Amino acid sequence: MNLKPLITMLVLGASSAAFAAPAVTVSGSASVTIGTRRTPPVVVRDHRLPAPGWDRDYGFQPAPIAAPGNIKHNSDSSEYIGPIYSMPRWNDAGWFKLTDPTRIELTRQIFNVNGQRFDALMLQNVTGSSSIRLVKVRFSDGSPDQTITLNQNLSSYQSTVQVNVQHHPIQTFVVYGTSNFNSTYRVLGT
Protein backbone atom coordinates (compact mmCIF):
# COMPACT_ATOMS: atom_id res chain seq x y z
CA MET A 1 0.00 0.00 0.00
CA ASN A 2 1.17 3.31 -0.93
CA LEU A 3 1.03 5.95 1.84
CA LYS A 4 1.63 9.05 -0.20
CA PRO A 5 -1.70 9.06 -2.01
CA LEU A 6 -3.48 8.33 1.26
CA ILE A 7 -1.88 11.28 3.11
CA THR A 8 -2.53 13.59 0.16
CA MET A 9 -6.14 12.56 0.08
CA LEU A 10 -6.57 13.13 3.83
CA VAL A 11 -4.96 16.59 3.67
CA LEU A 12 -7.00 17.72 0.69
CA GLY A 13 -10.20 16.36 2.19
CA ALA A 14 -9.65 18.17 5.50
CA SER A 15 -8.91 21.50 3.82
CA SER A 16 -11.96 21.31 1.59
CA ALA A 17 -14.10 20.49 4.64
CA ALA A 18 -12.76 23.66 6.35
CA PHE A 19 -13.76 25.75 3.33
CA ALA A 20 -17.20 24.24 3.25
CA ALA A 21 -18.18 25.33 6.81
CA PRO A 22 -16.10 28.33 7.99
CA ALA A 23 -16.14 29.03 11.76
CA VAL A 24 -15.31 32.78 11.64
CA THR A 25 -17.31 35.21 13.89
CA VAL A 26 -17.19 38.95 13.32
CA SER A 27 -18.30 41.47 15.96
CA GLY A 28 -17.94 45.24 16.29
CA SER A 29 -19.09 48.33 18.14
CA ALA A 30 -19.27 52.06 17.48
CA SER A 31 -19.86 55.23 19.54
CA VAL A 32 -20.95 58.60 18.26
CA THR A 33 -20.40 61.92 20.09
CA ILE A 34 -22.15 65.02 18.86
CA GLY A 35 -20.36 68.25 19.72
CA THR A 36 -17.06 68.44 21.55
CA ARG A 37 -16.31 67.12 24.98
CA ARG A 38 -13.69 69.10 26.84
CA THR A 39 -12.22 68.36 30.21
CA PRO A 40 -12.17 71.34 32.60
CA PRO A 41 -8.81 73.08 32.98
CA VAL A 42 -6.64 72.22 35.93
CA VAL A 43 -6.61 75.04 38.51
CA VAL A 44 -3.54 75.32 40.69
CA ARG A 45 -4.21 77.34 43.84
CA ASP A 46 -1.65 79.13 45.98
CA HIS A 47 -2.55 78.30 49.59
CA ARG A 48 0.09 80.49 51.23
CA LEU A 49 -2.41 83.34 51.61
CA PRO A 50 -6.14 83.00 52.26
CA ALA A 51 -8.64 83.70 49.51
CA PRO A 52 -9.64 87.35 49.06
CA GLY A 53 -12.40 88.25 51.43
CA TRP A 54 -11.44 85.58 53.98
CA ASP A 55 -10.06 86.44 57.41
CA ARG A 56 -8.54 83.50 59.26
CA ASP A 57 -9.84 84.61 62.67
CA TYR A 58 -13.28 85.98 61.76
CA GLY A 59 -14.39 84.22 58.58
CA PHE A 60 -15.66 85.99 55.49
CA GLN A 61 -15.07 89.74 55.36
CA PRO A 62 -16.11 92.12 52.59
CA ALA A 63 -13.59 93.31 50.04
CA PRO A 64 -11.02 95.79 51.31
CA ILE A 65 -12.24 99.36 51.48
CA ALA A 66 -8.88 101.12 51.62
CA ALA A 67 -8.40 103.26 48.56
CA PRO A 68 -5.36 102.03 46.66
CA GLY A 69 -3.89 105.52 46.52
CA ASN A 70 -4.02 106.51 50.19
CA ILE A 71 -0.83 104.76 51.37
CA LYS A 72 2.75 105.61 50.45
CA HIS A 73 5.45 103.06 51.30
CA ASN A 74 8.67 104.31 52.82
CA SER A 75 11.67 102.11 53.58
CA ASP A 76 10.45 101.07 57.05
CA SER A 77 6.94 102.53 57.37
CA SER A 78 3.78 103.38 55.49
CA GLU A 79 2.45 106.92 55.31
CA TYR A 80 -1.21 107.88 55.00
CA ILE A 81 -1.49 110.31 52.06
CA GLY A 82 -5.28 110.35 51.76
CA PRO A 83 -7.43 113.28 52.81
CA ILE A 84 -7.17 114.60 56.39
CA TYR A 85 -10.52 116.04 57.37
CA SER A 86 -10.93 119.01 59.74
CA MET A 87 -13.38 119.28 62.61
CA PRO A 88 -16.67 120.67 61.31
CA ARG A 89 -17.76 123.93 62.95
CA TRP A 90 -21.17 122.56 63.95
CA ASN A 91 -19.70 119.50 65.72
CA ASP A 92 -17.83 120.91 68.70
CA ALA A 93 -18.44 118.04 71.14
CA GLY A 94 -18.61 114.83 69.05
CA TRP A 95 -16.35 112.54 67.08
CA PHE A 96 -15.64 113.32 63.43
CA LYS A 97 -13.97 111.34 60.67
CA LEU A 98 -10.32 112.34 60.40
CA THR A 99 -9.19 109.81 57.73
CA ASP A 100 -10.62 107.43 55.17
CA PRO A 101 -10.22 103.68 55.81
CA THR A 102 -6.57 102.64 55.63
CA ARG A 103 -4.25 99.90 56.89
CA ILE A 104 -0.81 99.48 58.43
CA GLU A 105 1.25 98.10 55.57
CA LEU A 106 4.55 97.87 57.44
CA THR A 107 5.16 97.98 61.20
CA ARG A 108 4.01 101.61 61.51
CA GLN A 109 1.83 104.14 59.76
CA ILE A 110 2.45 107.90 59.83
CA PHE A 111 -0.33 110.51 59.73
CA ASN A 112 0.46 114.19 59.07
CA VAL A 113 -2.31 116.41 60.48
CA ASN A 114 -0.48 119.76 60.22
CA GLY A 115 -1.23 121.50 63.50
CA GLN A 116 -4.83 120.45 64.26
CA ARG A 117 -5.78 120.26 67.95
CA PHE A 118 -7.47 117.19 69.44
CA ASP A 119 -8.53 116.09 72.90
CA ALA A 120 -8.61 112.44 71.83
CA LEU A 121 -8.08 110.21 68.81
CA MET A 122 -10.10 107.06 68.18
CA LEU A 123 -8.96 104.15 66.01
CA GLN A 124 -12.06 102.44 64.62
CA ASN A 125 -12.12 99.03 62.94
CA VAL A 126 -13.71 98.87 59.47
CA THR A 127 -12.90 95.32 58.25
CA GLY A 128 -10.81 92.42 59.53
CA SER A 129 -8.55 92.96 62.50
CA SER A 130 -5.49 95.05 63.32
CA SER A 131 -3.12 94.81 66.26
CA ILE A 132 -2.18 98.22 67.71
CA ARG A 133 0.93 98.31 69.92
CA LEU A 134 1.31 102.03 70.57
CA VAL A 135 0.59 105.52 69.27
CA LYS A 136 3.29 108.20 69.27
CA VAL A 137 2.20 111.86 68.95
CA ARG A 138 4.58 114.67 67.87
CA PHE A 139 3.38 118.19 68.62
CA SER A 140 4.11 121.18 66.37
CA ASP A 141 4.53 123.71 69.21
CA GLY A 142 7.69 122.13 70.63
CA SER A 143 6.00 120.19 73.45
CA PRO A 144 7.60 116.82 74.26
CA ASP A 145 6.34 113.82 72.29
CA GLN A 146 3.59 111.71 73.84
CA THR A 147 3.77 107.90 73.61
CA ILE A 148 0.67 105.87 74.50
CA THR A 149 1.14 102.09 74.85
CA LEU A 150 -2.03 100.22 73.90
CA ASN A 151 -1.30 96.54 73.05
CA GLN A 152 -4.89 96.04 71.87
CA ASN A 153 -6.61 94.48 68.87
CA LEU A 154 -9.16 96.18 66.66
CA SER A 155 -11.72 93.64 65.45
CA SER A 156 -15.45 93.08 65.22
CA TYR A 157 -15.39 92.26 68.95
CA GLN A 158 -13.51 95.40 70.01
CA SER A 159 -14.14 97.91 67.26
CA THR A 160 -12.61 101.05 68.79
CA VAL A 161 -9.55 102.10 70.77
CA GLN A 162 -9.47 105.59 72.26
CA VAL A 163 -6.23 107.53 72.73
CA ASN A 164 -6.31 110.63 74.95
CA VAL A 165 -3.88 113.27 73.77
CA GLN A 166 -2.94 116.65 75.18
CA HIS A 167 -4.75 119.61 73.63
CA HIS A 168 -1.68 120.87 71.74
CA PRO A 169 -1.39 121.32 67.98
CA ILE A 170 -0.35 117.95 66.54
CA GLN A 171 2.12 117.79 63.66
CA THR A 172 2.15 113.99 63.18
CA PHE A 173 1.07 110.86 64.95
CA VAL A 174 2.36 107.36 64.28
CA VAL A 175 0.40 104.14 64.82
CA TYR A 176 2.65 101.12 65.50
CA GLY A 177 1.25 97.66 64.84
CA THR A 178 0.07 95.35 62.07
CA SER A 179 -3.07 94.92 59.96
CA ASN A 180 -4.19 91.45 58.92
CA PHE A 181 -4.98 90.53 55.34
CA ASN A 182 -7.97 92.56 54.04
CA SER A 183 -8.12 94.62 57.24
CA THR A 184 -8.80 98.36 57.39
CA TYR A 185 -9.34 100.94 60.11
CA ARG A 186 -9.96 104.69 60.24
CA VAL A 187 -9.03 107.48 62.63
CA LEU A 188 -11.62 109.72 64.30
CA GLY A 189 -10.91 112.86 66.28
CA THR A 190 -12.58 115.06 68.85
Image: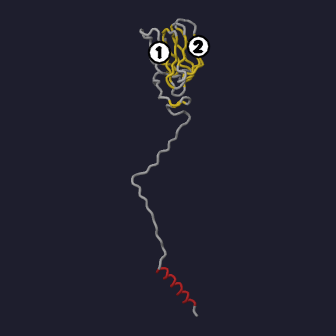
Decide: few, some or many residues near mark 1? Use Cα within 10 Å; few <14, some 14-19, many ≥20.
some
CA–CA distance in space, label 1 to label 2? 19 Å
**Residue beneath label 2, please?**
148
Residue furthest out toward the front: 157
- Residue 69 appears in which quarter of the rendering? top left
x and y percentages locating residue 37 in the rendered image: 43, 51
Question: Given the image, on which type of amino acid does mark 2 rest?
Answer: Ile
- The residue at the point 41 percent across, 55 percent down is 33
| Mark 1 vs 2, N-terminal side | 1
Q: Nearer the viewer, residue 190 or 4?
A: 190
Residue at disc 2, secondary structure: strand
Decide: few, some or many residues near mark 2? Use Cα within 10 Å; few <14, some 14-19, many ≥20.
some
Q: What mark, if any, has residue 125 been given in the picture?
A: none
Discs 1, 2 touching: Cβ within 8 Å: no
- The residue at the point 47 percent across, 15 percent down is 98
Q: Nearer the viewer, residue 102 or 172?
A: 102
Residue at disc 1, secondary structure: loop
Q: Is residue 48 above or below residue 165?
A: below
Q: Tell me which colouring the rendered structure shows.
A: secondary structure
**Residue beneath label 1, please?**
98
x and y percentages locating residue 123 in the rendered image: 52, 17
Q: Is residue 131 above or below residue 120?
A: below
x and y percentages locating residue 17 in the rendered image: 49, 82
- The residue at the point 55 percent across, 13 percent down is 163
Question: Given the image, on which type of amino acid does mark 1 rest?
Answer: Leu
